[in-house]
Image: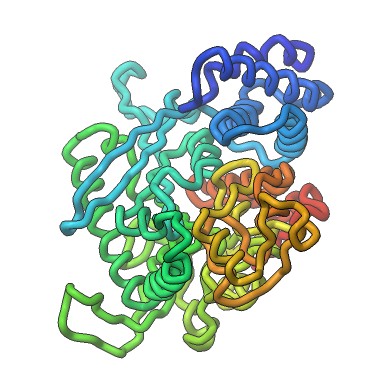
Amino acid sequence: MPSRMPRLLPRLLPRLLPRVATGPAASRATNRIARAVTGAVTGAGSLVATRLALSVSVLATSLLTGGCATFNGERLQAQAMARALSRGYQAQEQSEITARDFNWVVRDEPVQLTLLTPTVSPARKPELAPGLSPTKAPAPLLPLVIYLPGLGEPASAGRLWREAWASSGLAVLSVQPDALAQALDRPTTAASVAAQADEVQTLAHAAFALDGIVKRRALLAATLAEARRLGTSGDQPWARLDFTRVILAGFELGAQTAMAVAGERIEERAPAGLSGSRSASPTSTAGTSAGTAALPGLRGVIALSPHVDIARGSVRERFAGVSVPVLAITGTEDSDPFGIINAASVRRAVWLGMPPGDKYLLVANGGNHALIAGNGLRNPPPPPWLKLQRRLDGTLADESNPSSNGGQGRRTSGPSMIGTGRIAAGDTADLVANRPFDGRHLAAIMSVSRAFLDLTLREDSIAREWLTRNARGWLGDTAQLEAK
C-alpha cells in the first residue's frame, strides 16, 4: 500500500474534501497539497489510505478556505500536520462527511445550527437480531458531539475540530444563538472606536456572568429537546443521532456553558426577562455515568480554552460535582482576549478543581487563543476596530507603516487587549496576523481529542491505553498531557 500513496492521494483528495471551493484554482491548490502530503508520508510504511483521509481532508479544506497563503506555507503546514498525524492516534473509523445548516427559533430566539454527519456508514455494524437480514438492518445511530462556539463566533466556527471528529464516524452538532454569534460585530469607523471597545468589554463581562450561564444552559436544553423530538418522530437527519451517547464540547464561552451543564456548582440566578425572582442558593447538576440532570446521555466534556472566574471562589468546591470525563485543552499563550482572566495559566484551574476519574489536561506549548479556536491554520488579522483602538492607546504599531515603533508593537495587558476570541490577546497584530500555527499543535489537539471521544463514546480500551501510555511520548515538547 505505501508504494501506491503517490498515485492514490491526488485521486482521493477530491472525494475527501467536504465543503471546499471548486474550480481551477481549487484544483491546482488540491494538487499542490497532495504532492506535499505525499512527500511527508511515503516513508510511513504502516499508514493506509483510509487512515490518511482525516489529515488530508481537514488540512486541505483549511488551506483552500482560509484565504491567501504562500505555496511554502501550504507545503510546510501540510507536511508538518501529515507527519504528526501519521504517528498519532488513529481513530476507529474514517469517513467522508456531509454538512447541513439550520436556522431555528427557540424560546423566541434565533439559533444557528450546523450538523456534520458521516456520509459513509461507520465500519462497525450493529449485531443483528435472529432472522433479520443485513439489508433490513437499521443503520447504526451516530454518537453525538455537541459543539458550542465562543463569543462572537457563528455556528460554523471550530471547523478544524468539528470536521476531524465527524470524519471519525461521529455526528457533530454546532449550536450558537444569533445574539452571541453577532455580539462582536462592530462598524470600522475610527470616530467611535473607544466607545465600541468599552461596549465589547461590557458585553463580554455580562456574557460570562452568572445570568448569562443560566440563560445559555436553558436555551441549549430547549434546542436539544427539539432535536431529540424530531429524531424520535423519525425526521432526518435527526433520527440518525444517538442522544444516549453525547459529548459536549465548547470553546471559551461555549466551554463555560459546557462545564455548567457537566456539573459545575454555580450560583443560580434567573436571567433578566425570564423571571423576576432571584435565588442566591448555589446549585449543581452533578454528572453521573448516565449523564447529568441538565443533559441526559452526557458521557463527557471537551473544554477548549476553559473559562475560570477565580473571583467566584474555590475551584475545588465549584467543580467537585463534575464526575463525567473531561478533556480540558489550552495553551501556554492562551490569554484572555476580554481582559477577564489575568493569565493563561488560570485556565488550568478547571482541571485542577475537578475530582479524579478520566480527567485530562492538554496544554500546547506556545499555543495561543486563536489556535485553540480551531478556525484555520494561521492567525487571522484582528478586526479593524480593535486595531484602531490599540493604535489610539499606543499599544500597537501601525501595521501599514513598518517603521513605526521599529515595526514592533508593545506587549501590554488590561482592557486595551480585549479581542474577539479569534486572536491572541497580548500578542501584537503585526507579529501574529497570518502567522501559521505549528502543524504539530493542530495534530496534537486532533489526535488527543479523537482518542478521548473513542474512549468516552465507544468505550475503546485502545484509546485509553494510548492516552495514558503512548500520548506523552508522541507529543514530546509540543504539548503537555496530564491525567488523573
How is colour applied across the structure in the image?
rainbow
Q: Nearer the viewer, residue 11 or 425?
A: 425
Q: Is residue 348 left or right of residue 120?
A: right
The total number of labels drawn is 0
What residue appears at the point 17 percent right and 59 percent down from the top-left corner?
107
Spot occupied by residue 430 in the image (x, y as percentages of width and height): 69, 53
Residue 258, by quadrant, is bottom left
Spot occupied by residue 325 in the image (x, y as percentages of width and height): 52, 62
What residue appears at the point 30 percent right and 90 percent down from the top-left corner?
280
Q: Is residue 177 left or right of residue 197?
A: left
Q: Compared with residue 356, is residue 85 higher up or lower down, i.e. above or below? A: above
What residue appears at the point 33 percent right and 61 percent down from the top-left corner?
295
Q: Compared with residue 414, is residue 437 higher up or lower down, i.e. above or below? A: above
Query: Quadrant location of the N terminus?
Result: top right
Spot occupied by residue 19 in the image (x, y as percentages of width and height): 46, 27
Q: Nearer the viewer, residue 143 or 377?
A: 377
Spot occupied by residue 481 in the image (x, y as percentages of width and height): 71, 60
Query: Quadrant location of the C terminus?
Result: bottom right
Residue 184, by quadrant, is bottom left
Q: Is residue 178 left or right of residue 13?
A: left
Q: Compared with residue 57, is residue 91 higher up or lower down, i.e. above or below? A: below
Q: Is residue 397 left or right of residue 415?
A: right
Q: Compared with residue 378, is residue 316 higher up or lower down, i.e. above or below? A: below
- Do we see residue 104 in this rendering? yes
Residue 265, by quadrant, is bottom left
- Do we see residue 447 in this rendering? no
What residue appears at the point 61 percent right and 64 percent down from the top-left corner?
391
